[in-house]
Amino acid sequence: MSDSHYIHIGRHTVHPMWRFSFVSRFIGSHLGAPVSVLAEQASQAARVFTDSWNKFLFRRFWGESISSRDVDLVIDSYENVVLRNRFRWRDSARKSREDFTGEVVEGTFSPQATAMLTALFLRHTGKGLRIVTDVEEANKQDGAVICYGSSDSNFKTFELEAESGGALCQFTFNDSGKRGFRVGGNVYSIEKRDGVTYDKAILLRLLTRQQDSSQCQVVCAGLSEWGSLAAVHYLVRNWKVLHRRFDGFGQRRDFCVLLEVPFGHCEEARELASAVWWHRNGRVK
């Protein structure tokens, strides 16, 4: 063989591939551990930064003192809550959507809503929620308030609707006398299409008007229990998106998002309309 393919070391010859393998093992044995430690530290730093940034955005969305003050979740004082017939979540194996035929009593899903919101606040503030009924006094220390359910079932929701003057949305009736939400000049009610019943829901955020207050009041309300739970699900999954949309340029705004959700599929809520309150000139967009 030609000597150009070998490296001569005394009387012995070493193939270049063997020499490369030896160098690789040498580098790996001496530098592998430090590089691995640096990579792990970089990964931890990235997680800490992401977590801190999410907590900062969470405070911007809910108010700067959200971590230091109690947050009230206001629900109706439901009694004898039961779920009759059948309760069915979406079956991922089914390709066609079926209508939910079971009867859902008001308040049935409030435990699920409470669990989702509590997990959200524990993750970003380290604190849970204070659960109160609408017949109890809500937070008196300028803390945030979350109302679950429409003004037909939750008196605190009724109060917030009255205080806002219906600038963003109104709980009203359609031409057929059925309950609906008026947003952007249109009334949205429960309807049935292609054998599927669709509920409507609102996600409403109002900033408190008290002096030196940065807290907010949020309403998650549907025309039925499916809509109310869907509004909570939408809030938990999309609060950062809502923050980017409605809290731009360092200014927080009141907003209302109208959702549509098929019965039995609260995770499939989609936005139909929205309204924003611009405080500087008193204009609703």
Image: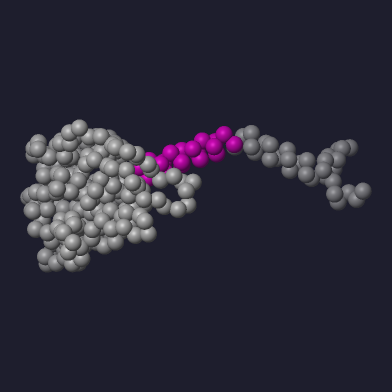
- Residue at horizontal 43 percent and vertical 39 percent from the top: 44
Q: Quadrant of residue 28?
A: top right
The x and y percentages for residue 131 are 18, 35
The chief SS type of the magenta part is helix
User: In terms of depth relative to the viewer, which is nearer, 24 or 84?
Assistant: 84
Q: Quadrant of residue 73?
A: top left
Which residue sits furthest right? 1
The x and y percentages for residue 127 are 25, 34
45 inside magenta stretch: yes
* Residue 267 visible in the displayed image: no
Visual colour scheme: one colour
The x and y percentages for residue 121 are 27, 39
The x and y percentages for residue 198 are 31, 55
- Residue at horizontal 62 percent and vertical 34 percent from the top: 30
Q: Would residue 135 appear left or right of 238 to someone viewing this image?
A: left
First to last magenta residue range = 32-53
* Residue 105 visible in the displayed image: yes
User: In terms of depth relative to the viewer, which is nearer, 51 or 79?
Assistant: 79
Placement of 165 over or under 109, stated as above or below: below
Quadrant of the rendering where the C terminus is positioned: bottom left
99 inside magenta stretch: no
Q: Would residue 7 appear left or right of 65 to someone viewing this image?
A: right
User: In terms of depth relative to the viewer, which is nearer, 139 or 39?
Assistant: 139
- Residue at horizontal 85 percent and vertical 49 percent from the top: 5
- Residue at horizontal 86 percent and vertical 40 percent from the top: 13
